[in-house]
Amino acid sequence: MIVRFKTLLCGVITSVLMISANIVSAKDQAPILMPVPASLVQSAQALIIDRPLALSLTGLSSQRSAFVKTYYQQQFSDFGYQVAPVTLGSALPINVTVQAPQASTSHYPQINQNEHYQLRINNTGIDISAASDFGALHALATLSQLLYFARDSRELALLQIDDSPRFPWRGLLLDSVRHFLSIPAIERQLRGMAAAKLNVFHWHLTDDQGWRYASAAYPKLHQLASDGQYYTQAEIKHIVEYASNLGIRVVPEFDVPGHASAIAVAYPELMTQVKPYQMEDGWGIFEPLLDPSKPEVYVFIDAIVAELAELFPDPYLHIGGDEVHPKHWQDSKRVQAYMRTHKLNTPADLQAHFNTKVQAILRRHNKKMMGWDEIFHPALDQDVMIQSWRGKASLSQIAAQGYPALLSAGFYIDQPQPTAYHYRNEPFDTDLHTAHPLNDNEKIQAWDFTMPRLKGSAVRGKLVLVSSQQTLNHVYLQLNDRPFKQARLDSHLIPPGAGLSRLNATIDSWMGPTRAELTLNPESGLAGRILIGNAVYPVTGKLDTQFTRADFTTMHFQSVMSAQAQGNILGGEATLWSELVTEHNLDVRSWPRLFAIAERLWSARQYTDPENMYHRLLPISDFADAIGLHHQKQFRQGLKRLLAKHDSSQNLALLMRFAEQLEPASYYTRHHIKYQQGLYHQNAPLDSFVDYLPIESHTLITLNQKLAQFKGGEKTALEDILRTLRTWNADYADLTALLTKTPSLRALLPQLKLAKTSNEIALSIARRCKIQTPISPSETRLLIATLREPQSQMQEIVVASTLFTESLLATCGDPVR
């Protein structure tokens, strides 16, 4: 064994590198880890890995110990390391010790368990100590990342990590109903979760479109309402054990009283409207509801809960409870009479009454109730867990009343959203709670606007501007009567002298990163566009001439989140609803974004720098591929299928470079387009180019980082940008020929045309920027119009390189006019 000494230079010669919230280290010195550990002290010395690795486990439960040893030995071997089956004198020891040894049989992970661990790399080997199996598992996940990134150098810095999570509940919901997911696909996601230190698998098993587990008590559920796609009880037990060995809890979701169309197919007598039902293959909210007035409904629920309690040892059972369409209850004489008897005035009261009965059933089976925002009601006991999809205002209100709560709004990964948006999604309150005090010389101006959507009602909003001497000081934005938020002003994108006639401002909304690019004219009104991520939505509006200073002082902001409320927020869950997800693109939609969400829930709150996050996320994507996740593989395989007889290494590389310039449209834009096309259902094909396209282009992320470096004075960054633009430019002729002759790719020709135009503009801007040739205001207007006009029609695929070209123009030329 060799210990090599190095000198670390960071302004001064130092022998210890401390990574903490208030000390920033050079990126090439800090290890690439995600999530960031709570504490890491790194020495100037390095350990050379010149011997086989020998993994020794002490104190882990016997079943888990055998699983973990085999699992990580294989992983280290896959990285290219030699692995010794036993600890020998000639091997490099990795000693893992659980300080409080577990029982001889495997025990299941629980909420609020001790997940703390210490990892030390010293001049004799690697030592891990933890208070439980689960801390030891997290330590091995950290070590796996360290070893992966040391696979070429075979050097590990001597260091000490002391780590534990910020939140105890760090989950992922997988929807096996809308599109069925095989056992191997679920196992693969569990392995990814373990690598990211996510510890709760929320398994959505029942919904309108199917019932996905074999029920012995009510067998017609899987016989008639699954299309033959369901999990046997043996398969469910296998997944629970597999997850437990990885330190992951499994919480099932059994949706009642709504999302019950599958139950209606199998047992229509349990429904409010008793009639024959057909399998539902559409997406949306449907009317069939269980009848809370029927005793046999509670017999049914009791039997299902008994089965689930036997299959799932976790104390929580999720009852759904969201999106209850009350029409059948309102139309039923029986239900209305029941409501009068029990003095229930509204459908919400009836659902709360139903939930109290369900809660009593769960308690008899030693289960705690969990559900979405809609189940929240003061009638429920305070051990009910509420999972919030409605947002932080709802989360804060629930937690303030003493209920344990989880955040899922902002972590919906079925929506194509930038990873940075999820990374900013802090569970604790970060928003402004009141408007800034008005000075005597400040003026206010309010605008009402409408943003139509392709499906559902338009988004309505209010924009409030605070200015002095025609200069904007503050902007507040409200969407759909939700609390106001202070917007970030991007004044550098506004032409000089525009005053209050132009606005470029951004907030994070429930839809995604929301940028308003508006023209404001008191006479002609408000016009422009709102970008939800990369998706363009037109917006129109008018001046609110009745808005007063008194109205300004009463604007509704999110309430301050108290320390008590914060204490009731136990973490969060990413959700992957599967309307547009199948096994063939499951990993493309999940990874590597989930590592950033995991970091938000594991690491300290102060880690918020998106540039640093992306600096680590891009190599973590390769790590994820190396441990067997399929996001890169599914992307390549999808393109190869589309190339068909034209598949070759050259054509695949060509198509992958084209994909660097594209992204799926953000938010639910794709869902809404499919709705308009009549393809918003379970049988619609999901095998086109957009279905395999990564959520965000890592190449465009890198280009934007280079542009920021150039703005900061690094002139060589512009050459890096030009190099990529030239590479793309050289491809367009071959791409035109390839797309034209390949039927499954021909629909991409309009995107190719826009990408080529955008790239020509970007090359021209970059070259002029390099020689410092100015771009006139008239040229700027023409270039912007050329880039934006083709995007006025919403498409499932966005030429995201156009947004980079606009940023390049804003940096090198006059601001957008």
Image (cartoon, helix red, strand yellow):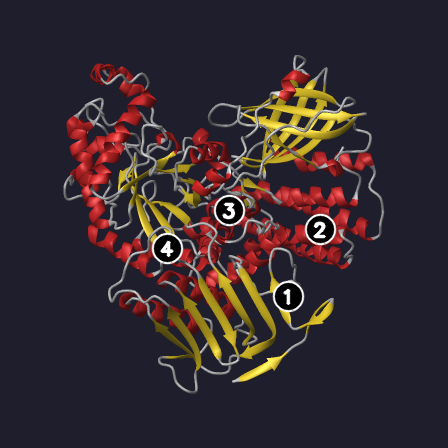
Disc 1 versus disc 4: nearer the observer: 4
Apparent side of residue 605 relative to residue 703 in the rendered image (left or right): left
Disc 2 versus disc 3: nearer the observer: 2
Reading the image, the residue beneath label 2 is 708
Q: Position of residue 323 (x, y in %)?
A: 36, 29
Between discs 3 and 1, the one toward the N terminus: 1
Residue type, label 1? Asp
Q: Quadrant of residue 273?
A: top left
Q: CA distance from mark 4 to mark 3?
A: 51 Å
Q: Position of residue 300 (x, y in %)?
A: 17, 34
Residue at x-position 52% and y-position 36%: 561
Reading the image, the residue beneath label 3 is 745
Disc 4 versus disc 2: nearer the observer: 4
Reading the image, the residue beneath label 4 is 113
Apparent side of residue 79 relative to residue 182 in the rendered image (left or right): right
Residue 28, label in figure: 1
Disc 1 versus disc 2: nearer the observer: 1
Residue type, label 4? Gln
Between discs 1 and 4, the one toward the N terminus: 1
Q: Is residue 165 above or below residue 336?
A: below
Which structural element holds mark 3? helix
Outermost bottom residue: 89
Between discs 4 and 3, the one toward the N terminus: 4
**Who is closer to the viewer here, 189 or 36?**
36
Q: Are marks 4 and 2 in contact (CB under 8 Å)?
A: no
User: Which class describes the residues within 10 Å of circle 1: few (<14), some (14-19), or many (20+)?
Assistant: few
